[in-house]
Image (spheres, rainbow, N blue to C red):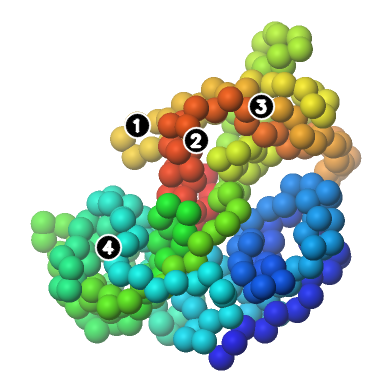
Amino acid sequence: MLVNLVQLRRDDIAPGVPLAFAVFDQERRLIYVEGQVIDSEAGIDELIARGAYRTAANETRSAGDTLPAQTPLANAKECAFEDMRLQAGDALQLQALTGKERYYVKLIGFLAGRSVLVTSPTMGGRVLLMREGQGLIARAFSGRAAYAFNTEVERVCNLPYPYLHLAFPALVQGVPVRCEPRIRLRMTASVTRMSSPGDPVAVQMVDLSPSGARLDARERLAGKGEIVRLSFRLKLEQDDAYFVNEAIVRSAREERRAGGRRTYLHGIEFIGMQPNERLLLRTLIYQRLAEGGRE
């Protein structure tokens, strides 16, 4: 069964608002996944001008969803489990074939042709009951692609800690994500104006990608084209990653919130970020996407 696509219209999308559907180009290749954000009116206008399509109502497809046998995605590919190059500790998402709930686990390891070992899913600090033989869809992000495969619970183990043996997949499906990954979050960061250095200004970072971010501030930080320095910290399991980078302001607009409160939204693009820093940031963002996409 093919996914139905409809022509994308200008009123289907708004700047800064997470997409409620996947977007494809004229050759039916995936260019935006559900939940990603297009920051500017200009970016939306360009997308409409070159011709784009979206999934029809009730057929939204996220980056890791398994693809039908007759997939319309020209860039979909089949690969082996090893081609994902997952590492111990990487996040996977599990979904029962008969339900919509999604659970997040971590890869422990695998033995090719035998089984994949993952931690047991938990909710509210409690281990969820899984039954042997239960069919699952597993999803993961790795590199610049989203992967999915069918599996089932082969063995439930409780010692020395709760974990699962999943059936080793004969086939994995992957969809390259051509645009930069972006996560929605709500975390405190600080900005220093380079044109008039002074005390850092506290802001709320509301989304983040390897190439830039969107900031919510109580005052106007800088005008379009000005340079600022952004400092923020991302939490890791055993340590934190601290980023300090200069960025150019690409957009700045004022908004009125409920109760008449005024706020300023700024879209910034990182400049001069070192390759190793960008790689670390991209890895952390993909990890966060696989774990739910929020801070």
The amino acid type, in three-letter code, at marker 2 is: Arg
Where residue 3 is drawn, which disc sits there? none
The amino acid type, in three-letter code, at marker 4 is: Glu
Name the mark nearer the viewer: 3 or 1.
3
| Residue 78 figure quarter | bottom left
- Badge 1 is on which residue? 239
Q: Earlier in the sequence, mark 1 or mark 4?
A: 4
- Badge 3 is on which residue? 247
Disc 3 and disc 1: Cα gap in Å?
25 Å
Q: Earlier in the sequence, mark 4 or mark 3?
A: 4
Label 1 Cα crowd, 10 Å radius (few <14 / some 14-19 / many 20+)? few
The amino acid type, in three-letter code, at marker 1 is: Asp
Identify the residue at horizontal 62%, vertical 28% (top origin): 271
Q: Secondary structure at mark 4?
A: helix
Residue 98 pos. (x, y %)? 42, 84
Identify the residue at horizontal 33%, vertical 52% (top origin): 90
Q: Earlier in the sequence, mark 4 or mark 2?
A: 4
> Is 179 displayed left or right of 263 in the figure?
left
- Badge 4 is on which residue? 82
The answer to whether any part of residue 231 appears in the image is: no
